[in-house]
Image (spheres, coloured by chain):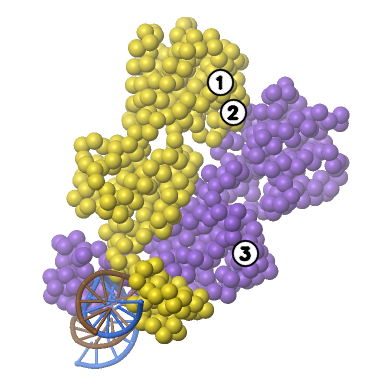
Chain colours: A purple, B yellow, C blue, D brown
DNA sequence: CTGTTAGCGCTTTCAG
DNA sequence: CTGAAAGCGCTAACAG
C-alpha cells in the first residue's frame, strides 16, 4: 500500500513534512507544501485511516445505535434520524456506523467504543437500566440519548416534548368546539405513551373538559389497535366527537375503522394523530397531527456529541424540542 | 489505554500468546488459554480495532452508500435495506458505515475505501457513469450494485425483476376479467420505471389486450402525480376498468383521487401498485400490489460482498430477484 | 505450544 | 521551517 514514505521520497522531504501538509499545519513553506501536494496527486496517495486512528487514538467514527426494527417502530423515524445525523457529522469528517441492537436481549451499548472503533454514540433506546447508564458514565463514554430522558445522571439527551404535543392536540380540538374528546394510547409501558396521555389528561382538566375513563382506550401504537380502539369508541352510548391518537399509525387505523363503520371524518368525528409520519399526508382525509421534529432531533444530538468529542463541552445538555401542530383535514369544527 | 502487554504481563505469557487466544487460534494449551482469558476478564481488556485494522489491513467495516434522501426515494427502502444488510454482515463481525451521497453532484464512491476505512461497498445508485464504474473496477474495489444492473462489466449486482412484476400485475388484472387496463408511470428516466412500463406493454400485447396511448399516463413516482394521473384517466370517454401504478405512492394518490371523484375502488375501478411499502397495507381499501423484496435484496447483496471480501468469490454474481403479487382489496373481478 | 522480531502507516516529541 | 526517533497496539513470520 502506498504510504507517506512514497510521497516523501517523491517530494524529497521527510514523512513528517508530508504529515504536516496532509493535516494542513501552517508550519510548512509554501514551496515545500506545493511539492508535497503535487507528489500526493501524482501518486494518488490517500492517508490510511487505521494508522491515523491508531496514532491519534481517534477513529473519526460515531455510532448510532437503535433497536432493531420490530413491528411498531417506524422506518421513517430511523431513516430521517440517521440521514440528519450523518449530514451534521460529515461536516466534521466523521462517519456513522449504524448499529442496531436486539431490544429483547441484554444490550451492551459500549462494545464498539471499547474497541475504539467509534469515538462516541447516539443512543436510541426505549429504556435503559440504571446499570447500563452507569456503565457508560463510569467509562467516560461520550454519548447522547436520543428521544429519551434521564435526569438522574449528568448526561445529555435530546427529546421532544410529548406532554406538550398532547396538550396542543387537545387545545386545538377544543378551539374547534369539541368538548367530548377521547384518546387512544400507546400502552402503559412506553414513556412516550405515558407523557402523551398525561398531556391529554392535563389539558382536559385545565380546560374543564369532561374526563371519562371509557373515552381512554389503551392501544399499542399499531394500526390494528387504532382500528379496534375506534370501533370501541364508536359503539359508546355517549360518543365523543373527537379523538386524540397517541401516534399516527393508530390514527390511520381509526380512519379506516371510521370508513368501515360509515362514520364520516371529520364531519361526524375529528381525528388527530401524533408524529407526522409520511403516511399522514397521504390518508383520506389527510391527517391532522402533531409533528415530532425527528430531523432536528438528530441534528441537535449530533452537534452535542461532536462537542463532547471535541472536549469543549461544559455541562451535559438536556434538550427538549417543541412539537408542531400540522393542520390538515381530519378535524373539523363541531 | 489497556493493551495486550498488560494482559500478557498479568498472565505471564507473551503478547503473541494473548493475540492467539483473542483470535481463537488452536495452538495454545488449554491451561495457558484459561490464564489469558482470566487476565482479560479481570482487566476488562478489549482489543483495539485500529491496531488490528492497521496490521491486518482490514477494517472489518463495509459501507452502504445511498443517495441522500430526496423527495421521491422512500425511507422505508433505505431503512429496510440497511437493517437487512447489517444483520447479515454482523454475523461475520463486520460493521456498517452508512454513507449517503448527494445525487446532484459528482460522486466519488471509492473515497472511504481508499483510506481503508471500509473494506468494501454496497452501492445504491440510480445511474453511474461509465467512468465511475471503471474506476471502481480498476482499483479492485470490492463492491456490489444494489437495485441496479450493469452487464457491460464483470461486476456483481442484485436487482428485482421490474419487468416481470409489471407482467404479473397485468396478468392478475386480466385474470380478474379486466381488459381495459391503464398504467401510470414513474417517468421516462428512471430505469425501474422503464422496465415496469415495458412489462406492462408486453403483457398487454401477449394477452391480446387493447393498448391505447391515452391509457398510459406519465407520472413521477409521487403521490401527487398519481392523483393527477387518476383524474385524467377518470375523465376519459373510454374509461379503463383497472390501472397499474408504477409504484405504491402513485397508487395511493390514485386511491385518494378516486375517493374525491366518487369512483368506488375496487367496484368501479381496480388499482394495483408496485413495491409494497408499508403504507400499502394501511390504505382504504388496502392496496393490492407487487412486492419488491427489499430485505432479501440487502441480504443477498451483503452475502455477495462478504464472499468478495473473503477472497473466495469466483465469478461476478448477477442476481435478479422475483417480485411477488400481494393480493389485498383494491382490485376486484370485473 | 510459546516467544522474538519486525513491521503496518501514522503522529508526537524533541532537535536542529 | 524541517527532520530523526520512538511508539500507538496489533499480527505475520520465523525460531525454538
- For label 2, the SS is loop
- The chain identifier of the residue carrying mark 2 reads B
Task: Give the label on residue A318, or none.
Answer: 3
Dot 1 and dot 3 residues touching (CB under 8 Å): no
Structural distance between the alpha carbons of marks 1 and 3? 47 Å
Structural distance between the alpha carbons of marks 2 and 1? 9 Å
The answer to whether residue B159 of the structure is visible from this angle is: yes
* Quadrant of the image containing the N terminus of chain B: bottom left
- For label 1, the SS is loop
Give the total of numbered labels. 3
Identify the residue under disc 2: B283
Task: Indicate the position of residue A44 as horizontal and vertical percent values.
Answer: 19, 60
Dot 2 and dot 1 residues touching (CB under 8 Å): yes
Closer mark to the observer between disc 3 and disc 2: 2
> Which of B119 and B197 lies nearest the eye of the viewer?
B119
Q: Name the side, left or right, on which A17 lies relative to A175.
A: left
Dot 3 and dot 2 residues touching (CB under 8 Å): no
Structural distance between the alpha carbons of marks 3 and 2? 39 Å
Task: Give the label on residue B282, or none.
Answer: none
- The chain identifier of the residue carrying mark 1 reads B
- For label 3, the SS is strand
Residue in view at x 72 percent, y 33 percent: A228
Tag 3: Cα neighbours inside 10 Å, few (<14), some, or many (≥20)? some
The answer to whether residue A319 of the structure is visible from this angle is: no
Task: Give the label on residue B330, or none.
Answer: 1
Tag 2: Cα neighbours inside 10 Å, few (<14), some, or many (≥20)? many
Residue in view at x 34 percent, y 71 percent: B27
Sequence-earlier tag: 2 or 1: 2
Residue in view at x 42 percent, y 14 percent: B215
Amino acid at each position: 500500500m502506498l504510504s507517506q514514505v512514497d510521497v516523501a521520497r517523491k517530494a524529497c522531504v521527510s514523512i513528517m513534512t508530508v504529515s504536516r501538509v496532509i493535516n494542513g499545519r501552517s508550519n510548512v513553506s509554501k514551496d515545500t507544501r506545493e511539492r508535497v501536494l503535487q507528489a500526493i496527486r501524482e501518486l494518488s496517495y490517500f492517508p490510511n485511516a487505521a494508522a491515523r486512528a491508531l496514532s491519534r487514538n481517534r477513529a473519526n467514527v460515531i455510532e448510532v445505535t437503535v433497536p432493531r426494527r420490530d413491528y411498531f417502530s417506524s422506518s421513517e423515524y430511523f431513516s430521517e434520524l440517521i440521514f440528519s445525523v450523518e449530514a451534521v457529522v460529515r461536516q466534521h469528517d466523521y462517519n456513522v456506523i449504524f448499529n442496531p441492537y436486539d431490544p429483547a436481549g441484554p444490550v451492551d451499548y459500549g462494545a464498539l467504543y471499547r474497541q475504539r472503533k467509534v469515538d462516541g454514540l447516539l443512543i436510541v433506546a426505549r429504556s435503559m437500566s440504571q446499570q447500563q447508564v452507569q456503565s457508560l458514565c463510569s467509562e467516560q463514554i461520550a454519548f447522547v440519548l436520543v428521544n429519551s430522558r434521564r435526569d438522574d445522571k449528568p448526561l445529555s439527551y435530546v427529546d421532544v416534548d410529548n406532554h406538550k404535543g398532547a396538550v396542543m392536540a387537545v387545545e386545538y380540538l377544543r378551539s374547534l368546539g369539541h368538548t367530548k374528546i377521547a384518546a387512544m394510547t400507546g400502552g402503559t409501558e412506553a414513556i412516550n405513551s405515558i407523557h402523551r396521555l398525561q398531556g391529554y389528561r392535563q389539558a382536559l382538566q385545565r380546560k374543564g373538559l369532561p374526563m371519562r375513563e371509557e373515552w381512554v382506550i389503551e392501544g399499542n401504537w399499531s394500526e390494528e389497535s387504532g382500528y379496534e380502539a375506534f370501533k370501541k369508541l364508536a359503539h359508546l352510548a355517549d360518543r365523543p366527537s373527537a379523538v386524540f391518537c397517541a401516534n399516527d399509525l393508530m390514527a390511520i387505523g381509526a380512519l379506516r375503522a371510521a370508513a368501515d363503520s360509515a362514520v364520516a371524518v371529520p364531519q361526524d368525528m375529528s381525528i388527530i394523530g401524533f408524529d407526522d409520519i409520511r403516511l399522514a399526508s397521504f390518508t383520506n382525509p389527510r391527517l391532522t397531527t402533531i409533528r415530532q421534529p425527528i430531523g432536528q432531533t438528530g441534528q441537535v444530538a449530533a452537534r452535542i456529541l461532536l462537542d463532547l468529542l471535541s472536549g469543549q463541552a461544559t455541562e451535559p445538555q438536556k434538550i427538549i424540542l417543541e412539537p408542531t401542530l400540522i393542520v390538515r383535514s381530519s378535524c373539523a369544527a363541531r
